[in-house]
Image: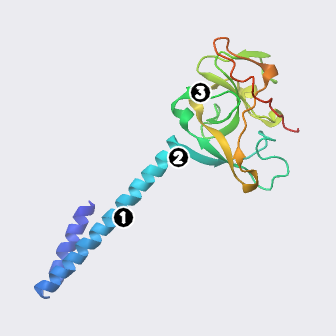
Amino acid sequence: MLNFYWKTFLQFTRKIHSHIGRRCQSTRLNETISNSASWSTLLMTAGFTCCFVSNLDDKVVTYTMVSGSSMQPCLNPIGSKCNDRVLIDRSPKRNYKKLKRGELVIYRTTRNPDEVNIKRLVALEGDTVTTLGYKNRSVLVPTGHCWVEGDNHRFSDDSNVVGPVPLGLISGRATHIIYPPSRWGSLCRRFPHSRVKLNPCEKDTVSHLPDVICGIS
């Protein structure tokens, strides 16, 4: 369609300037074609840039602002003047085996697919969790699922409310705080050692992790 419009424009230009000398007409035509090439290059560059940025955001890395108090004091600590922005690694979206207990993950909630939460990954499939207020005191995480919790669990809509979360809903993991500048730094993995019994088929990969610091609430 774009080529058709340019062809029509060039034909119209020739008719308007038919009385002008051949050299002048040739010059005008060359200028028009040159401008056409410039605009085409610009549009192609913009299109490729948009595709690249979109794929980067969806498949490699992005960032997001964290709202609420469910992850205090790790994120949005009391007294902070603005909400934390965190860097999100998208690699677990392509390979869930990269997920590690104790790190922070983002996922779409089971009750509202438009809502995205950030919580701590407490347990993976085959682990047994002693829950905090869930209908079952103890839960064996089923295959293809995980158990997520907010550090400030009294104000957290997490697995203690909805149960195990499908791994397919996880879209990334938070690795660093990038804003505000005063809080720049990597996010530490933590693990509630007293409440989780690891899958007996897996090696102990969490014994060296510090315990979860619960929110003040």
Mark 1 element type = helix
Q: How dense is the environment of label 3, judged by Cα within 10 Å: few (below 14), some, or many (20 and up)?
A: some
Measured as percent of width and height from the top left, residue 154 is found at: 83, 34
Nearest to N terminus: mark 2 or mark 3: 2
Q: Position of residue 22 (x, y in %)?
A: 11, 84
Q: Amino acid at mark 1?
A: Leu
Residue ID for mark 1? 42
Q: Say left or right for 216 vs 19.
A: right
Quarter of the image for residue 112 reads top right
Whether residues under marks 2 and 3 lie with C-beta atoms below 8 angstroms apart, the answer is no
- Rounded to the nearest angstrom, the CA distance separating label 1 from label 2 is 22 Å
Vertical order, 196 against 168 (above or below):
above
Q: CA distance from mark 1 to mark 3?
A: 41 Å
Name above or below for residue 193 compared with residue 106. Answer: above
Q: Which badge, 1 or 2, comes first in the chain's sequence? A: 1
- Residue 116 falls in which quadrant of the image? top right
Sequence order check, earlier mark of 1 and 3: 1
- Residue 90 in the image, given as x and y percentages of width and height: 56, 39
- Given residues 154 and 31, the one toward you in this image is 31
Could you tell me which secondary element the residue under label 2 belongs to? helix
**Disc 1 + disc 3, Cβ < 8 Å:** no
Residue drawn at x 61%, y 43% as measured from the top left: 88
In the rendered image, the residue lying farthest to the right is: 217
Q: Secondary structure at mark 3?
A: helix
Looking at the figure, which quarter contains the N terminus? bottom left
**Residue at 81 percent of width and 41 percent of height:** 73
Q: Is residue 217 left or right of residue 11?
A: right
